Amino acid sequence: MRISCTIDEIDLAGDYDDVPSVSATCSRCGHCTESCGRSEASVRRCLVMPRKQCPERESNFYVEGDEDE
């Protein structure tokens, strides 16, 4: 199943300063994943991580956007 996620720009604490980062929030359960950096690769990493970390133990395909299928 395709599940949409909201992508937000955030700052994560680094060793010496805050690190520009991104987070992805699942539209179904609200679970949030975070990744350092704001590149497309960081966004993709945030969208892949919920498959392993889903609190509902679901194995969905997560996408950026507003529509679920």
Image (cartoon, rainbow, N blue to C red):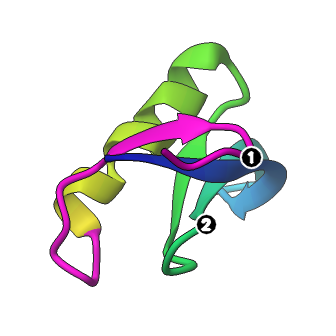
- Contact? badges 2 and 1 (CB < 8 Å): yes
State the image coordinates of residue 30 (x, y, percent, origin top left). Answer: 57, 78
Name the residue: 73% across, 28% down: 38
Over which residues does the magenta segment extend? Answer: 54-69
63 or 22, nearer to the observer? 63
17 or 47, nearer to the observer? 47
> Height in image: 66 above or below 12?
above
Q: Name the chief secondary structure element in magenta.
A: loop
State the image coordinates of residue 52 (x, y, percent, origin top left). Answer: 18, 58
Q: Residue 68 lies in magenta, yes or no?
A: yes
State the image coordinates of residue 64 (x, y, percent, origin top left). Answer: 64, 36
Q: Is residue 2 left or right of residue 36?
A: left
For the residues marked 2 and 1, what is the alpha-carbon distance in whole angstroms?
A: 8 Å
Q: Is residue 31 left or right of residue 15?
A: left
Name the residue: 28% across, 83% down: 55
Q: Which residue is mark 1?
A: 66
Question: What label sits on residue 27 in the rendered view?
Answer: 2
